[in-house]
Amino acid sequence: MRKTILPILLALALIACGEVSREEWLHGTWFLAHNPQQDSEDELSFSRDGTVAIHTARGEVIRGKYLVSEGDLSLVLDMNGRPLEVHFEIAPDHSRLTYQNGAYYAKRE
């Protein structure tokens, strides 16, 4: 577990120091395009400064940081003061962000 957390903490430290994300394809809003588990309909908004905001169907906003690494998108979210790590698989053509349950997000144009 330590090996997983250390790179994320390092990346988040770089982001906090003003490092700007180079992942231009990711910046903007992504909507839940495929929802096999009928989970809540939320949207993900990625900013150039390395932050993410999840806008839930109930009108809540969950904030955190993101890191892209070798086809993996990692989010570290602030859940009432406790960090929660969430992973998505990035499609090779950057068209989808797929969650472990098969749901995926597509970019809103």
Image (tube, helix red, strand yellow):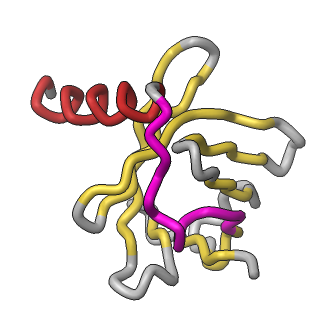
Residue with the most extreme left position: 3
Q: Residue furthest bottom?
A: 93
Relative depth, front residue between 52 and 87: 52
Horizontal relation, residue 10 to residue 39: left or right: left
Location of residue 66 in the rendering, given as x and y in whole percent from the top left corner = 46, 44
Dividing the picture into quarters, in which one does residue 91 lie? bottom left
In the image, taking residue 52 as reference, residue 102 lies left or right, namely left
Query: Which residue range is magenta in the image?
Result: 18-30
In this view, 37 is above or below 87 = below
Q: How many numbered discs?
A: 0
Query: Which residue sits at x=36%, y=55%?
Result: 68
Residue 88 left/right relative to 58 = left
The image quadrant of residue 92 is bottom left
Q: Position of residue 87 (x, y in %)?
A: 38, 51
- Please report the residue visible at 30 percent of the width from the left and 26 percent of the height from the top: 9
Magenta segment, principal secondary structure? loop
Q: Which quadrant: the N terminus?
A: top left
Q: Quadrant of residue 78?
A: top right
Asked whether 80 falls inside the magenta stretch, the response is no
Q: Position of residue 34 (x, y in %)?
A: 61, 78
Considering depth in this image, is 6 or 86 the residue closer to the camera? 6
Which quadrant would the C terminus be assigned to in this image?
A: bottom right
Residue at (69% x, 46% y) in the render: 54
Q: Closest to the observer: 100 or 96? A: 96
| Residue lying furthest right | 59
Residue 31 location (% of width, % of height) = 70, 69
Q: Is residue 20 magenta?
A: yes
Residue at 10% x, 31% y is: 3
